[in-house]
Structures are given as structure tokens and as C-alpha cells.
Image (cartoon, grey):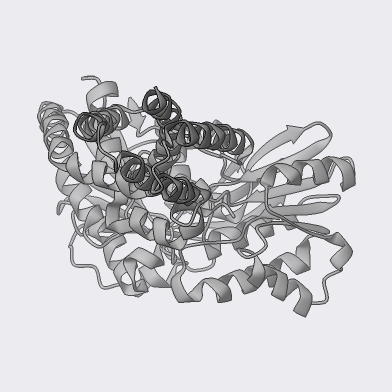
Amino acid sequence: MGKILFFMCYFLYVILRSKKSFHMLQQNFYNNSNRYVKWIFNNYKKSILTVDWLFLIIVIIGLFGIDIGYLMAVFYFIMFIYYYDYLKFEQVKIGLKLTKRIGRMCITLFILYVLLVIFYKDSNYVYFLFGVLASLNSFVIYLVNVINKPVEKMVYLHFFNMAKSKLKNMNRMSVIGVTGSYGKTSSKNILADIMKVKYDVMPTPQNYNTPYGLMLTINNKMDKFLEYFIAEMGACEVGQIKELCDFVHPKYGIITRIGVAHLDSFKTEENIIKTKFELIESLPHDGIGVLNADDPKQVGYSIKNDCRIVWVGIDNDCDYRAFDIKYTYKGMSFKVNIDGTDYEFSSSLIGRANIYNILAGIALSHELGMNISDIQRGVRSIKPIEHRLQMKKMGNINIIDDAYNSNPVGSSMAVEALSLMPGEKVIVTPGMIELKDKEYDYNYQFGVEISKVCDKVILVGHKQTRAIQDALKDNNYDESNLYVIDDVKEAFNIVGRDCDAGAYVLLENDLPDIFNE
């Protein structure tokens, strides 16, 4: 009876632990580039050195001939209650998505445990074995991921071939690729809003920018009447943009801006630049690439392709240059000289970053045959992009939601946008990540910019924001206006309690749950 109670309580607890491990595995792209393994060792206090190991005390008691089944049952029931309570109050931004892949992994995990129960239920080592497996649950889930790799490869190939076949039959459709270190989703959505005035256009949804994301979009959403498919393309390693291009074969391409995002996996800035230009160098000879003339990394790159290149910018002479720019807290307007005539464009979006994105949309739309009046109408109709300098209201507080930004240039532009707002200016940020050995320096510079603009600063994570704290201190920022917290939920309590009515609050970067302190 003791073992039966033990297994009941044990598996209640293991289900909770496995859910958390699956969540971290999913957020680490199923251990792509060993991200999940790195997370395990970087967070060893959460994943390895846990209170689970207290079960060893009970196992030692069992060495004296005492039946410990009931003690182990009580232990894991207490652990279940403890962990359930912990998960209930844990800060979670993006929860575990119960995909079919997760479902297949759950089946594999179930089979593993069933086999172990069958072979070891009558063994004296059952409590030790299962206790170790619970304590090392993160590694058990890693093993399940490894076991399932052949199955996932077959599933991938099935849907990949289905998508390739569908694309082959879309004779009237052209593909536009959009990549860059940041601004991909914004640029993609802005281009789609402009082109929809004249064409049947479909962008990839949300931030679907991986082979799986493109396959899902093609197989589930694409119809035969489509004229343009705008494919967002993301990467964290050299060759991944080329892989996407070989899949969908874009004829047109846009590079937004090139920064230092994912430097941990790219290793060098040169690798980042080379990877982004895989899009332009994959275009056909009669294709068109749209590049940013204000980005030194793009201007200085020697393109290995003879397709047509169109340049956009603000500060430097180029094919489509924005000038006479006017910002307000309600939006912005600017002019562009096209074919010798100045045309004015206006949008409810805010920020310099969005001007670049709109310029890319104007340039490619015009090159594809749209007339200026239609493009102007398209620009006016651009919808705010979720979590990317998106204006919101929270009671009498104005929120500038830039939660998806996590790079030096984008964050700097967001602070610049905040500086244009009237009234009290507040920032909520955990800083920037995945910048390798430059992370401290970039966050320090970010802190310097914050000190010049923000009336109040709310930093999320004591350790994560150390560089920003140092910058604020070195620039004599008033400590009474600085808040350092570990849970972003507390930030909204501070905003509601301490900020003026009508204040503008910039939410800059929302780190994935794998970076929770």
C-alpha cells in the first residue's frame, strides 16, 4: 500500500516538474544550439540543486530496514503542494504552448515511466531511482527530447514537403523576405498594410520566422489567390536565413537594421552581418533588395549578388530619404522625394525606428508598381504593431509598449521616442540580454541614455540590471526615483501609486521566462 501511495503522490509532483521543464525546453527552442542545456547549468539552483534531494534522508532511514513507502508518499505530497504554490505565483510572460510536439514528448515520458514502474516496482532501489529522476527532471526532459528527435525529423519532413509542394503550385505569387536584428515584425506588418491597398497580400502571423513558422503559415493559411507572401526570417546562427530562402525562394528582400542581437550564438558581429545578407544574396537577378543607408553594417558590406538594390534612410542621401520629420505624442509625419516630387506621409506610429520601417514599405511598394496616393493611404492605415512602440492606456497612465525590443539601437530609439512625450516620463526595463561579453557595456550606455530622459526608472532584476544601476549612479541620477524589483508585476503597482496622472511609461524589453531571477 505504501508504494501505491508513493507512486500516486510522486507522479502528481513529477507532472508539475515536467510541465516547468517542458516550458523551459520550449522557450529554449527545443535545445537548438544547446540553449536548454546551457539554461540548466546557468540556473543550476532551480534545475539541479533543489530541495528534491531531501528524499535521500528518507532513503537513508530505509537502509535500517524501515518501510519508507508512506514517508516517501508524504514527502512528495508536500513537494507537490509546495511546487504547485510556487508555480501559481511565479511570474510567467509566455506560458507553455501545448503543441502536438509537446504532446508527443509527453507520450514518450509516460512510456519511460511506465517501463520503469514495471521493472522496478518490486525493487528495494525503487525509491532511490525515482527520487533521483525527480531531482534531475530537467535532464529527463532533455533525454525525452533526444529520444523524440527522429520522430520530429519525420514530422518536419512531412510538413516541409507539403509546404514545398503548395508553394510550387502558387505560380502567380511572389515572396518577400524580411530580416534584420530587430524591426522584422514591424517592417513586415507595415509593408503588408501598405500593399493591401492594391494587392492580395499575406504576412506570416505574429513573429513566425522559423522553418516551422513558415510551414504552418503556408500549409494552413495560404490560398491560391495570393499575390504576395511576406515571410519574416529570423536566425541565431550562420546559415539559417539561407535555409529559409532555399525553402520559400524570395524574389524581394528587406533588411531592417543589423545589430548585436543573439551575439551569444552568432559569436561575432561579422557572422551576424553575413547571415542577414544571406537574404539579399539569395534573391534572383531580377529581384530587388531594400537596404538601410543609415546602417554602417549594411553600407559597408560587399554584396555578392547583382540584383537591384534600393536604399532608404534619414541621415544619408539615398533613393528614398525621409526629411522634414515632425513628431508628436499622437504620431508623426515626414516627406519623401520620389521621382523628383516631394510627397508627405503621416502615421499614428511613433519613433524613428518606425520611420525606417515605413520607408522600406514605401520603397518596395513603389518599386512593385503602387502609385503614390495608394501608398500614402496605406501608410495612414498602418495599424499599431503589438508590443513594438504600441501606445496603450492603463487608467490615466499612457503606456508605450515596446516589450519585444532587446537590442542597443532599438532600445535607444525607444528612449528617444519617450523623450518626445509631454509630462512625466517613466521606463520599466530588465535591460538587454544575449550580448555576450559586451552585455555590460551596452546596458551601461542604455543606462546613460535613460538618466537623461526618465523622471522615474523601474528596473526588473537586481543582478540583470547591475550595469544600468551603475550608469544611473555615475550620472548622479536621483536614487529616490529609482526602483529595483524582481517581479515585473510589482512595476504596475509602483506606476499606479507613484506616477503622475497622464505620465508616459515605456515598457522596454520583456525578457523570456528563462531569464527570471
The x, y position of residue 492, in whole percent, is 76, 41
- On the question of residue 513 being in view, the answer is yes
485 sits to left or right of 123: right
Q: Is residue 473 above or below residue 219?
A: below
Residue 183 seen in the figure: no
Q: State the image coordinates of residue 85 (x, y, percent, origin top left).
A: 61, 34
Q: Residue at x 25, y 41 (%)?
A: 144
Q: Which quarter of the figure is the N terminus placed in?
A: top left
**Front residue of this view, candidates 440 and 341:** 440
Q: Quadrant of residue 318?
A: bottom left
Q: Residue 396 at x, y = what percent? A: 84, 34
Total numbered circles: 0
- Left/right of residue 124 with respect to residue 192 in the rendered view: left
Q: Position of residue 97 (x, y in %)?
A: 41, 31
In terms of depth relative to the viewer, which is nearer, 395 or 173? 395
Q: Nearer the viewer, residue 208 or 120?
A: 120
**In the figure, residue 6 lies in which quadrant?**
top left
Viewer-closest of 291 and 421: 421
Left or right, residue 439 beside residue 261: right
The residue shown at (58%, 46%) is 403
Q: Is residue 343 above or below residue 15?
A: below
Residue projecting furthest to the front: 65
Quarter of the image with the C terminus in it: bottom right
Kindly identify the residue that appears in the image at 83 percent across and 50 percent down: 422
